[in-house]
Image (cartoon, rainbow, N blue to C red):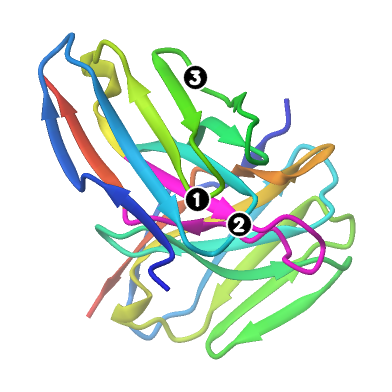
Amino acid sequence: NAGVTQTPKFQVLKTGQSMTLQCAQDMNHNSMYWYRQDPGMGLRLIYYSASEGTTDKGEVPNGYNVSRLNKREFSLRLESAAPSQTSVYFCASTLKGREAKNIQYFGAGTRLSVL
Amino acid sequence: GQQVMQIPQYQHVQEGEDFTTYCNSSTTLSNIQWYKQRPGGHPVFLIQLVKSGEVKKQKRLTFQFGEAKKNSSLHITATQTTDVGTYFCAGPYTGANSKLTFGKGITLSVRP
């Protein structure tokens, strides 16, 4: 099993450009998440999807959109990138339920720079 | 809103020294999780504590959940260079157990 796979690993954008960060998990997990990590700020939740067909805003959703394409895939879109969106983006997934303990499994991350 | 706090954000220790860090929540937690992120890597789950006063050990790492379930600690005995990284604690959002609130993490550096 590959776990959680994110693409691309690195990306440089110019201000105003758009792009989609891809995330796929092969663990049959219900819930998926997008976080951004900035120095001194920890992990901040952008959007999440509790189950296929649902998405909800997290702590810092402005400037982003998401799509839960199917149970495996959860993409994050930047419609008009801004320098403030320079960050490391992590996708995570979890299998809901007491037995699963709601442990989150993270992808390797996408390092995005917006110039 | 719910907050999970980790202070300080950085700590430097000499190899072989013990290290302890704390995590405090503004609300009572049903459980608390700890994750480790190596430099340049991604967060990896370490452990979950569920019961009041629970203590769990993983080799040189000891995790404890407070009696009131509002705080937790991580103690590393005789730190090694392999312990370098950022340690996050996380608790579930109230009413939505699949979401987690992460602390800002503590970054540990170890001098050989």
State which chain disc 3 sits on.
A
State which chain disc 2 sits on.
A
- Residue at x 53% of width, y 87% of height: B60
- Residue at x 10% of width, y 17% of height: A14
User: B83 or B91: which is nearer to us?
Assistant: B91
Residue B76 seen in this snapshot: yes
Rendered image: mark on residue A61: 3
Instruction: Estimate how packed mark 1 is, as few (under 14), some (14 to 19) or many (20 or more) residues with alpha carbons within 10 Å.
Output: some
Q: Is residue A103 magenta?
A: yes
Instruction: Estimate how packed mark 3 is, as few (under 14), some (14 to 19) or many (20 or more) residues with alpha carbons within 10 Å.
Output: some
Looking at the rendered structure, the kind of residue marked 3 is Pro
Residue matched to label 2: A29
Q: Is residue A4 magenta?
A: no
Residue A11, compared with residue B76, is above or below; it is above
Between circles 2 and 3, the one closer to the viewer is 2
Looking at the rendered structure, the kind of residue marked 2 is His
- Residue at x 41% of width, y 51% of height: A24
Whether callout 2 and callout 3 share a subunit is answered yes
Q: Which residues are magenta?
A: A89-108
Earlier residue among tags 1 and 2: 2
